Image (spheres, helix red, strand yellow):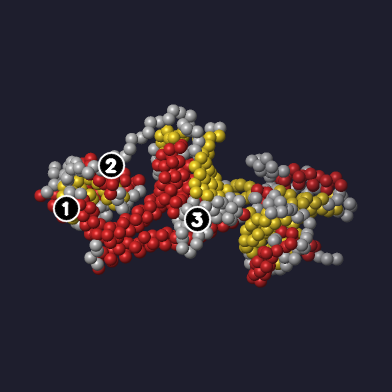
């Protein structure tokens, strides 16, 4: 027979909580072991002799605290059935002393088993109640469930493709395609052929090999077959999953649809390529006129020229300067139009007059290349509301392109007709034509056709982009089509038609008179050559000209001999032309002088700043001499 104290020792030293309860509804605590005292932070004196439900009462502030009721039911079943009863993971908060010294309840979970203990006479003596604190386990399981719930919610909310792969990537276990790719619910070993275009197989295999070698996250951009059978792009990321032993057992991945981003990247690369081509062409085009200008300058310095050679040399310089001016004007024009800085001077226009003026501008080029031109005008009185200069520019640009890209002796046609409320202008040629991909982007900035090494069909790829922007400013549309290389092209303009009486023809531009009044003119420019050449031109017209290269010296010179007209550069040393203008306006002798800015700053913002400084006019280098003479006529 084992000694009694041995059973007492086993009871007290058990790692699980035990106590003996009276077999009555009050469940008085008869004995309690050390493990439960430790778990409940109580002493034996505090518990023995008390009802279990007095020692550990229900939390009245917690409507979800059903622990006492469930435990009472369990003990009642033991008394009634005389058999053990088990409660799995019972929520039973217990009262504890909080850090602030007040009493409160602490969330606890217990697994409990109540066993009836009988005496020798078979009567129920007590109930042995054992429990295990499983709070940590229950909270961990709840956290796992919540994490899985959030993961599933995230999976359902994301537009990304979700997939699972075997540890060696030989098998796709599941894929949720989100409409981007086809779904796979059952494992498949043919996933590479099913989802990846053959051209990207090697890329994907190499990425997988790198990830598997280091057990790292796979991140790879590659093409995929979309659910509709077309080819798209995805950014795929897959994370390795390891078990408790560190063994890799699966990969979980997400794939984002980046097809649109890839398309934009291709467009940006193409735009960058065209920009580089444009800059190369611009460099070439600007150097071309500089060569004869430089040669002419050298000739003028080295040789005493007769009148014939001098005239021919000056004509060459003049032509090349006009060519350079036209190139720069095109650049500034495109910049202003594409940034929305152009304001249209809209009037009622006769379409026939606009077309005749455009044809007149391009006739020298057409004749030089031996083309024939058919001009088909709309009925007399056909009108549109628009900016005359800009619409002439549009038609001349299209017709000039047709002339340049048609081999010599070609046929050109300009046809205008009204249909419903729209005016249609078609420019046709039988020239080199366009491939479909070029026609699709003909109006994009910097787009250029193939050109020969002599660049006889030169250009900067700006003209058609400018045409498109100007026509859209007029509320119209542009289009082009071609049957292919060598099949000619057709460029079409569509504008809103105006049903209105024909407007009176504008008065002809004023011309500088031969009897211009002689003026005292001050020229201020730190570019010595530019100042001297401008002075020579003005002196040739009989004006009295004083040249200064320093703005402060110019101010001093005006005190002795106040000028009637001041031609001022803006980028001057010391003080700029804007400040010089302000000081001239502040002096009585020059307060009413005609101030004209002559500068390379040609943007609209520059013009506004110049006029605000007190200038009367703004001319952009190289200046239009005829325009300058007109301004001087007004001053005289």
Between disc 2 and disc 1, the foreground one is 2
Q: Nearer the viewer, residue 399 or 290?
A: 399
Q: Quadrant of residue 188?
A: bottom right
Q: Quadrant of the C terminus?
A: top left
Residue 85 percent coordinates (x, y):
82, 50
Residue 46 percent coordinates (x, y):
66, 51
Which disc number belongs to residue 381?
A: none
At label 1, counting other C-alpha atoms closer than 10 Å, the crowd grade (few under 14, some 14-19, many 20 or more) is: many
Q: Nearer the viewer, residue 162 or 633?
A: 633
Question: Could you tell me which residue is drawn at 37 percent across and 55 percent down?
Answer: 323
Contact? badges 2 and 1 (CB < 8 Å): no
Q: CA distance from mark 3 to mark 1?
A: 51 Å
Q: Secondary structure at mark 2?
A: loop
Q: Is residue 350 depicted above or below 132 in this figure? A: above
Q: Secondary structure at mark 3?
A: loop
Q: Secondary structure at mark 1?
A: strand
Q: CA distance from mark 2 to mark 1?
A: 26 Å
Q: Nearer the viewer, residue 117 or 108?
A: 108
Question: Could you tell me which residue is drawn at 70 percent across and 56 percent down?
Answer: 225
Between disc 3 and disc 1, the foreground one is 3
Q: Quadrant of residue 611?
A: top left
Residue ID for mark 3: 408
Residue ID for mark 1: 546
Residue ID for mark 2: 511
For residue 524, say whether it is visible: no
- Sequence-wise first label, 3 or 1: 3
Residue 223 percent coordinates (x, y):
65, 59
Question: Could you tell me which residue is drawn at 62 percent across and 54 percent down?
Answer: 259
Q: Is residue 444 left or right of residue 593?
A: right
């Amino acid at each position: 027979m084992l000694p009694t104290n041995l059973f007492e020792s086993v009871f007290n030293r058990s790692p699980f909580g035990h106590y003996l309860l009276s077999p009555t509804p009050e469940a008085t605590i008869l004995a309690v072991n050390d493990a439960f005292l430790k778990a409940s932070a109580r002493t034996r004196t505090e518990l023995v002799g008390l009802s279990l439900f007095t020692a550990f009462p229900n939390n009245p502030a917690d409507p979800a605290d059903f622990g006492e009721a469930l435990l009472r039911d369990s003990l009642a079943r033991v008394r009634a059935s005389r058999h053990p009863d088990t409660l799995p993971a019972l929520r039973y908060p217990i009262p504890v002393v909080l850090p602030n010294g007040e009493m409160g309840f602490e969330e606890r979970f217990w697994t409990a088993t109540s066993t009836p203990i009988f005496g020798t006479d078979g009567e129920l003596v007590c109930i042995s109640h054992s429990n295990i604190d499983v709070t940590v386990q229950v909270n961990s399981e709840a956290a796992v469930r919540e994490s899985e719930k959030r993961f599933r919610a995230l999976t359902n909310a994301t537009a990304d493709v979700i997939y699972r792969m075997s540890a060696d990537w030989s098998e796709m276990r599941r894929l949720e395609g989100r409409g981007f790719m086809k779904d796979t619910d059952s494992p498949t070993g043919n996933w590479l052929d099913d989802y990846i275009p053959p051209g990207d197989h090697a890329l994907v295999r190499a990425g997988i090999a790198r990830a598997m070698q280091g057990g790292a996250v796979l991140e790879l951009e590659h093409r995929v077959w979309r659910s509709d059978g077309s080819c798209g792009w995805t950014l795929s990321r897959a994370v390795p999953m390891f078990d408790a032993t560190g063994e890799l057992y699966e990969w979980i991945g997400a794939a984002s649809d980046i097809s649109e981003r890839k398309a934009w990247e291709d467009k940006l690369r193409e735009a960058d390529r065209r920009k580089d081509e444009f800059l190369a062409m611009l460099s070439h085009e600007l150097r071309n006129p500089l060569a004869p200008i430089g040669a002419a300058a050298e000739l003028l310095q080295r040789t005493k020229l007769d009148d014939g050679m001098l005239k021919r040399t000056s004509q060459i310089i003049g032509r090349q300067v006009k060519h350079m001016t036209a190139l720069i004007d095109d650049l500034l024009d495109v910049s202003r139009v594409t940034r929305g800085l152009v304001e249209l001077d809209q009037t009622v226009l006769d379409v026939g007059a606009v077309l005749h003026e455009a044809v007149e501008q391009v006739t020298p080029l057409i004749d030089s290349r031996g083309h024939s031109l058919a001009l088909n005008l709309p009925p007399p009185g056909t009108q549109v509301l628009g900016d005359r200069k800009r619409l002439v520019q549009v038609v001349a640009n299209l017709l000039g392109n047709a002339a340049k890209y048609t081999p010599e002796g070609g046929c050109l046609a300009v046809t205008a007709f009204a249909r419903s409320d729209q005016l249609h202008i078609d420019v046709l040629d039988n020239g080199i034509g366009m491939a479909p991909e070029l026609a699709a982007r003909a109006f994009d900035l910097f787009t250029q056709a193939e050109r020969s090494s002599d660049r006889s069909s030169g250009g900067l790829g700006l003209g058609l982009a400018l045409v498109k922007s100007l026509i859209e400013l007029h509320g119209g549309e542009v289009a082009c089509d071609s049957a292919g290389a060598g099949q000619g092209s057709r460029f079409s303009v569509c504008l809103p038609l105006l049903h209105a009486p024909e407007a009176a023809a504008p008065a002809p531009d004023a011309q500088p008179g031969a009897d211009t009044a002689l003026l005292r003119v001050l020229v201020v420019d730190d570019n010595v050559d530019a100042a001297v050449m401008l002075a020579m031109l003005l002196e040739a017209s009989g004006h009295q000209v004083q040249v200064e290269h320093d703005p402060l010296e110019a101010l001093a010179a005006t005190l002795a001999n106040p000028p009637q007209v001041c031609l001022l550069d803006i980028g001057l040393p010391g003080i700029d032309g804007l400040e010089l203008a302000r000081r001239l306006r502040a002096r009585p002798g020059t307060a009413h002088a005609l101030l004209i800015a002559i500068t390379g700053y040609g943007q609209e913002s520059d013009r506004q700043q110049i006029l605000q400084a007190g200038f009367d006019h703004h001319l952009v280098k190289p200046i239009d001499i005829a325009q300058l003479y007109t301004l001087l006529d007004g001053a005289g």
